[in-house]
Amino acid sequence: MTDPCFMDTPDDLRRYTLSELTGLCSALRTYLIDHVSAHGGHFSSSLGVVELTVALHYVFDTPEDKIVWDVGHQAYAHKLLTGRGPLFHTNRLLDGISGFPCRSESDFDAFGTGHSSTSLSAVLGMACAARLQGNNTRKHIAVIGDGAMTAGQAFEALNNAGYENADMLVILNDNNMSIDANTGALQHYLSELTTGKQYNNLKSRIKKMLSPDDATGPAVMLYKLEKILKGGLLRYSNLFEALSIRYFGPIDGHDLKKLTRILEKLKHIPGPKLLHCVTEKGRGFAPAMEHKAQWHATSAFDKHTGIRTGTGNATTFQEVFGNTLIELAGNNPRIVAISPAMLSGSALSRMKREMPDRVFDTGITEQHAVTFAAGLATDGLLPFCTIYSTFLQRAYDQVIHDVALQQLDVVFCIDRAGVVGPDGPTHHGAFDIAYLRCIPGITGAAPMDLEDLRNLLFTVQAGKSMGPFAIRYPKAAGNGNTLPPGFRELECGKGRRIRSGKDIAILSLGAVGQYVQEACAVLEKEHLDIAHYDLRFFKPLDDVLLHGVSRQFSTLVTIEDGCINGGVGSAVLEFIAEHGYQVRVKRLGLPDTFATQGTQQQLHALYGYDQQAIITLVRSLANDIHRHKPADEHQAPGFTGNITLV
Ligand SMILES: Cc1ncc(C[n+]2csc(CCOP(=O)(O)OP(=O)(O)O)c2C)c(N)n1
Ligand SMILES: CC(=O)[C@@H](O)[C@H](O)COP(=O)(O)O
Ligand SMILES: [Mg+2]
């Protein structure tokens, strides 16, 4: 079905009148509300940049000119105007189009995004490449939000851009929001720029005095005066100007006429420049304008009432994490929590309300957040540094150099571990087991269920110095809503037997152990006697458990919600090789590819580690065992190890 706002290319809109462009903006908003209310997805950021998107495609010659959308969660209107309209019903679905800009999807997507604050670096790279290749006409535009601007990488790029003097335009889309309210001194600074009375008053007085056609006499004087004042006032009081980036604005980012006019001018101004646009997140949908933090991304909802439909009520790992941390912090004054701009998603908002001084939202600053945690730990505090698995990739050196090397007591609460679903390859928590496991002195755990998560959180703060300690858990409901009160201290590096058996042993890590339980129940009915062990820790491994199963079973299956290469299954293989066991090991998890988007269940099935895949694999392994063993050898040598049973 076609829609008035679908366009193959933005060529058509370049012929539109201002009122037609305004009509197009309304059509885009209507479509966005209709689509997201039916399917869910990122929402209010796209609503906020509708005019900006139209104006950019109107003024610039895309795709020859390059636009990079920082994070990319606000690029829905851009997609609708650049050929993706007819496919938009597949947005974020398995085999559908991506929710983020994606180079393989369209020439109009100049750079793939998903993680924040990369746009300035990418655009600067493109601008320098154009210069080197003698292309003096191409334009390079980064659209970056006030939240994304808080990241170190954005400042690294500004620093470099001012020096390189390359031809690029930064659109700073300032809506005074990150996912939650934007925090930090930069936000205060931007607000001061927006409302800064001194400079704005002066500027508008000068503007009024300057008549556009009076190019002589007092007007020239005033023009020079403005330049001097701007040079002085701006150069030394404006952050961007001080870095040799020309600053323009602030302007109303919903005023199409002003936007197109200033962009047209900026197109002809060489060198690095920044246009400060003030926009409203959620513009055009009243509930999103009122409760901004709730509408960054959403599940399906009733577009008339804003009431969400079909949200489950099963307890999630996130809820248990957030509530447990408050419970523990109530008794342990050492505990503090850190989140780089993901308070709501990480279930830390309640703790922030109840214990504001003990929760730090550091902005989109994963690197800083980790080293900041290290600093807190040097003084005896116990930081729970809560970061999504995919975003912790940003802070790898800080984990190694600032925390692990100094054996500081920092707890890494690694949320969104495993596949996350519709956000897709940019956001899956695929790699953390592999990238943490090789770091000396770190402890790594993954709870199989909610009770386990509570006990791990309790254990890590119970008294002993633990050094760096990572706990990874998925974006998922756990098993059941009722949890036993109180806590139990767990032994570090010890797994547990969930069920005994004699044919094959399955070693699971984390919540996918629940699939194993379901699979074993089915297989039992087929007289397959499968043992199931929850490894619980990916580092250190439970040597006793592994010696035991390697002696008792001829076939082991490992399963994890993470990449197979370098994951816990690989750790088990290393153990087996080192100790010279002759055991067949089949590893389940994410293959050596960037996992696609889809629901978590679809992805677990697609990559072969859901309940059904386990059943199918075990049936075939059991068949193999049966075929290859002489009748009297069916019983493996007895297990003499001492497995810790819980
Ligand atoms: C490295 C990284 N950390 C965290 C996030 C999660 N995240 C996505 S959007 C967002 C807020 C962005 O705010 P802003 O740039 O102001 O854009 P807005 O949504 O306000 O338009 C955050 C924290 C991310 N995508 N990448
Ligand atoms: C674009 C981005 O990075 C975030 O908006 C992310 O999609 C949030 O994911 P959750 O919805 O799982 O918190
Ligand atoms: Mg913002």
Image: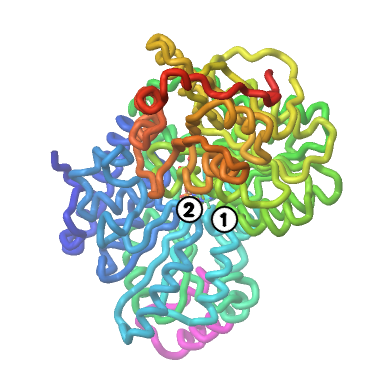
- Residue drawn 67% across and 34% down? 542
- State the extent of the magenta-drawn residues as a range: 203-228
Q: Report the coloring of the rendering.
A: rainbow
- Residue drawn 40% across and 42% down? 423
Of residues 234 and 589, the one nearer the viewer is 589
Q: Is residue 23 above or below residue 614?
A: below
Q: Residue 167 falls in which quadrant of the image?
A: bottom left
State the quadrant of the N terminus.
Answer: top left
Instruction: Assign a secondary structure to mark 2.
Output: loop
Amino acid under disc 1: Arg
The residue wearing badge 1 is: 394
The residue wearing badge 2 is: 115
Q: Is residue 122 left or right of residue 489?
A: left
- Is ligand 1 within 8 Å of the beta carbon of the residue shown at mark 1? yes
Q: How many marks?
A: 2
Q: Is residue 218 magenta?
A: yes
Amino acid under disc 2: His
Q: Residue furthest top?
A: 525
Q: Is residue 366 magenta?
A: no
